[in-house]
Amino acid sequence: MADIEAARKAFERYDLNGDGQITAAEYKSVMAQLGDPYVTEPVAQAVINAHDANGDGLLTFDEFWAAQNKDGEKTG
């Protein structure tokens, strides 16, 4: 299981405008800052869509947290 405080910090790093949602543009921008310039906006949207529980095309902290725990269960 992921650490919720670490997850909150990671989420806040991606939520550039602080509105509580990660957009594809925000995800793409942060990935570029982290050294991955190959993540395009459509790729970022696909990553978000894979974890977007309500289908709005955005990632909330609850969805982000659920994805962290789901990924942890697969590997741990």
Image: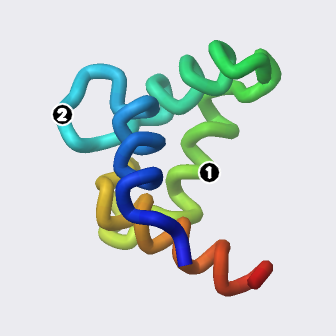
Tell which tag, 2 or 1, sits nearer the viewer: 2
- In this picture, is 3 found above or below 66? above
Mark 1 secondary-structure assignment: helix
Which residue is more in the foreground, 53 or 6? Answer: 6
Amino acid residing under circle 2: Asp
- Tag on residue 14? none
Say which quarter of the image contains residue 62. Answer: bottom left
State the separation of the CA atoms marked 2 and 1.
19 Å
Give the residue at x 65% y 76%: 72
From what the image shows, is residue 72 above or below residue 32?
Answer: below
For numbered disc 2, what is the local secondary structure?
loop
To which residue does mark 1 refer?
47
What's the coloring here?
rainbow
For label 2, the residue is 19
Residue drawn at 44 percent across, 73 percent down: 66
Q: Is residue 1 above or below residue 58?
A: below
Residue flagged by tag 1: what amino acid is it?
Val
Measuring from the top left, give residue 70's x and y in whole percent: 58, 79
User: As rendered, which of 44 and 15 lies closer to the eye?
Assistant: 15
Q: Quadrant of the N terminus?
A: bottom right
Q: Earlier in the sequence, mark 2 or mark 1?
A: 2
Mark 2, other Cα within 10 Å: few <14 / some 14–19 / many ≥20 = few
- The percent coordinates of residue 9 (x first, y second) are 39, 41
Q: Nearer the viewer, residue 3 or 55?
A: 3
Q: Which residue occupies 22% across, 42% down?
A: 20
